[in-house]
């Protein structure tokens, strides 16, 4: 008898709530009677259905059944040898054609009926089809390996930007997305400035745009465009620093901005958050011909970097209650970063001015430290602040409730001051 017969057997042996009785052929009923009279424990009967199906799948005998939509009888012939199991239940209407079909169904050998009568499982027999099934499984895993890897790797989503008066445009530079926000009203008659905003580890261009709101500052000022590039690896851990491809990427983005957006070649700036801030610090020293000035927000000196140039004017926004910065050295990293930025100062003096800043909301204390250009050392500004609760967030009223400080506005003001200072 076939797989559907086995289901009928199991249904009759294992009580089920709301189970509908299934019609059984006479020889199936006989089999049910044999098993019911067998010395089988009650607990074993509860698993009989799975055992029957399992055993039948391992040792089927091939039977060819030809049926038509009008025929009321079927002819059955046993081939006399073991054949592969049919995994389809041919009683499913969707699998039945309107003319005829040939189905491979399951038969239990006579000796296995006797074993079941004695309360023993059917004998297992080696089947080449079992090995074939495993081989097919392995091939399927290998075949879908590339697809699975493709699905597991992070990918850029479909972008949905918040409504802004200006225009957000997407460019692809060296295979990477670069988003440019053009304010609705831009200053005419003189070249525009551009501020590249670099996201941190595991972040995205969209993420840093939402966190920094730099495009809103651009919209309000109308004299610069905000640029949001992606890392080479979407949601990657760090930027490429001195890799040739990374250096080429930033040069190519700068060329795009000067060519298509009327950006002055000496009016390109960069600011970054976390690992993006470390990349910005790297760029001011290694690409001073591309960037007029940079700023870092919650970031310090890149590890294992050797700076040999004079660098460019730099602003550092540093929270002294940042748990991420604490993991990378905390106050020691802060002091090392300032020492590197002021390494060309012949006087070695401290800041020329210290201006207190607002401490409302979640900001405990804050001040602006300023070092002017001295000798070959460019100017340096530091927004030194401390949050009431540990945070690695970009400083602004959205991320730090109750504060009036906005890192994006302070960074842009720092860049504007650079523009009026002879390079």
Image (spheres, helix red, strand yellow):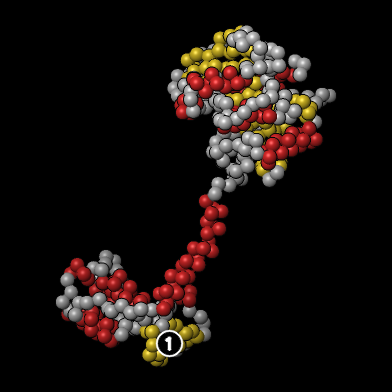
With 421 as the anchor, is 61 left or right in this view? left
Occupied quadrant, residue 39: bottom left
Q: Residues within 10 Å of mark 1 (few under 14, many from 20)?
A: some
The residue under the point 53% across, 54% down is 149
The residue under the point 23% across, 68% down is 46
Q: Is residue 91 above or below residue 351?
A: below
Where is the C terminus found, in terms of image quarters? Answer: top right
Occupied quadrant, residue 243: top right
With 414 as the anchor, is 146 left or right in this view? left
Locate residue 384, reporting x and y percent: 54, 16
Q: Residue furthest right?
A: 189
The residue under the point 44% across, 83% down is 103
Locate residue 169, reporting x and y percent: 71, 38
Where is the N terminus found, in terms of image quarters? Answer: bottom left
Residue under label 1, please give it.
64
The residue under the point 56% across, 30% down is 303
With 265 as the anchor, is 159 left or right in this view? left
Occupied quadrant, residue 16: bottom left
With 56 as the anchor, is 221 left or right in this view? right
Locate residue 193, reporting x and y percent: 74, 26
Locate residue 326, reporting x and y percent: 47, 25
Foreground pick, 120 / 349: 349
SS for tag 1? strand
Residue 309 visible = yes
Q: Is residue 363 above or below residue 267?
A: above
């Amino acid at each position: 008898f076939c797989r559907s017969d086995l289901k009928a057997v199991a249904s009759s042996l294992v009580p089920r709530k709301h189970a509908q009785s299934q019609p059984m052929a006479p020889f199936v009923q006989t089999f049910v009677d044999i098993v019911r009279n067998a010395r089988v424990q009650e607990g074993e009967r509860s698993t009989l259905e799975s055992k029957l199906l399992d055993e039948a799948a391992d040792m089927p005998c091939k039977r060819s059944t030809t049926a038509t939509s009008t025929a009321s009888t079927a002819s059955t012939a046993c081939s006399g040898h073991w054949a592969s199991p049919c995994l389809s239940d041919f009683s499913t209407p969707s699998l039945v054609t309107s003319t005829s079909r040939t189905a491979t169904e399951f038969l239990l050998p006579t000796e296995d009926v006797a074993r079941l009568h004695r309360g023993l499982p059917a004998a297992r027999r080696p089947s080449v089809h079992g090995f074939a099934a495993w081989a097919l499984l392995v091939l399927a895993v290998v075949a879908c390996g590339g697809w699975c890897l493709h699905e597991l790797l992070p990918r850029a989503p479909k972008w949905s930007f918040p409504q802004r008066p200006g225009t957000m445009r997407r460019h692809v530079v060296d295979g990477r997305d670069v988003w440019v926000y053009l304010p609705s009203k831009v200053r005419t008659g003189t070249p525009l400035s551009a501020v590249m905003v670099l996201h941190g580890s595991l972040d995205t261009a969209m993420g840093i745009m939402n966190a920094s709101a730099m495009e809103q500052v651009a919209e309000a000022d109308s004299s610069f465009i905000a640029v949001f590039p992606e890392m080479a690896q979407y949601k990657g851990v760090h930027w490429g620093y001195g890799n040739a491809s990374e250096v080429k990427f930033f040069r190519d983005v700068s060329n795009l901005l000067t060519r298509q957006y009327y950006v002055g070649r000496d009016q390109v700036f960069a600011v970054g958050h976390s690992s993006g801030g470390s990349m910005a610090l790297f760029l001011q020293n290694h690409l001073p011909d591309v960037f007029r000035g940079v700023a870092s927000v919650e970031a310090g000196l890149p590890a294992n970097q050797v700076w040999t140039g004079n660098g460019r004017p730099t602003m550092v926004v540093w929270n002294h209650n940042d748990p991420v910065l604490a993991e990378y050295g905390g106050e020691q990293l802060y002091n090392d970063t300032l020492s590197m930025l002021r390494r060309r100062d012949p006087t070695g003096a401290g800041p020329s001015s210290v201006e207190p800043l607002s401490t409302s909301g979640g900001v405990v204390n804050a001040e602006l430290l300023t070092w002017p250009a001295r000798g070959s050392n460019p100017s340096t500004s530091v927004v030194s602040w401390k949050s009431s609760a540990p945070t690695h967030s970009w400083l602004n009223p959205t991320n730090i409730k109750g504060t009036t400080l906005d890192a994006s506005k302070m960074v842009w003001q720092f860049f504007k001051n650079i523009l009026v200072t002879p390079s």
